[in-house]
Amino acid sequence: VEQHGVVDGIYRLSGVSSNTQRLRQEFEAQRCPDLSRDVYLQDVHCVSSLCKAYCRELPNPLLTYQLYDKFADAVAIQMEEARLVKIKEVLKELPAPHYR
């Protein structure tokens, strides 16, 4: 995504719905889509849109409901160095699949 798109706002902008659905269907059919195809290179936002949709649809978010309060407390720390240390500590508590 970052290699072929304008990085500013790439994850904020939505892709063309039909391209995003086509990409989703390729993944759901257990195929590994060729992201270098023109349809995806011309609409790199469909790739980021599908990634965001995947994360939204997970039964338990990447940062897990169980650790939500700890993450919220960590990001609320004013001092940047202390905030980063705390975030890293909480990340280490994630279940292995979420951490990966």
Image (cartoon, grey):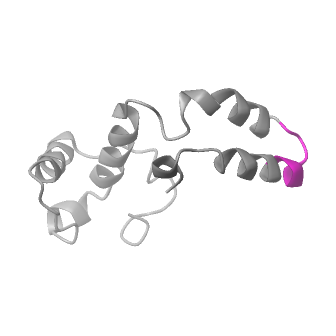
For the point 54% across and 52% down, the residue is 99
Residue 22 appears left or right of 71: left
Q: Name the image quarter holding residue 32.
A: bottom left
Q: Nearer the viewer, residue 63 or 78?
A: 63
Examine the structure image and report whether residue 74 is included in the region drawn in magenta: no
- Residue 86 at what x, y percent from top left? 80, 46
Q: Vertical placement of 52 versus 81: above or below?
A: above
Residue at point 17% right, 68% down? Answer: 34
| Coordinates of residue 8 in the picture (x, y in percent) | 52, 57
Between 7 and 67, the residue placed more toward the observer is 67
From this view, report whether residue 26 is shown above or below residue 66: below
Q: Quadrant of residue 41?
A: bottom left
Q: Nearer the viewer, residue 79 or 42?
A: 79
The residue positioned farthest toward the left in the image shown: 29
Give the extent of the magenta segment: 77-83
Total marks placed: 0
Left or right of 64, for residue 90: right
From this viewpoint, which residue is outermost toward the right? 79
Q: Quadrant of the N terminus?
A: bottom left
Q: Residue at x 16, y 69 (%)?
A: 37
Q: Residue at horizontal 74%, vertical 49%?
A: 89
| Residue 79 locus on image (x, y percent) | 91, 47
Residue 60 coordinates in the image, percent (x, y):
44, 31
13 relative to 72, above or below: below
Q: Quadrant of residue 76?
A: top right
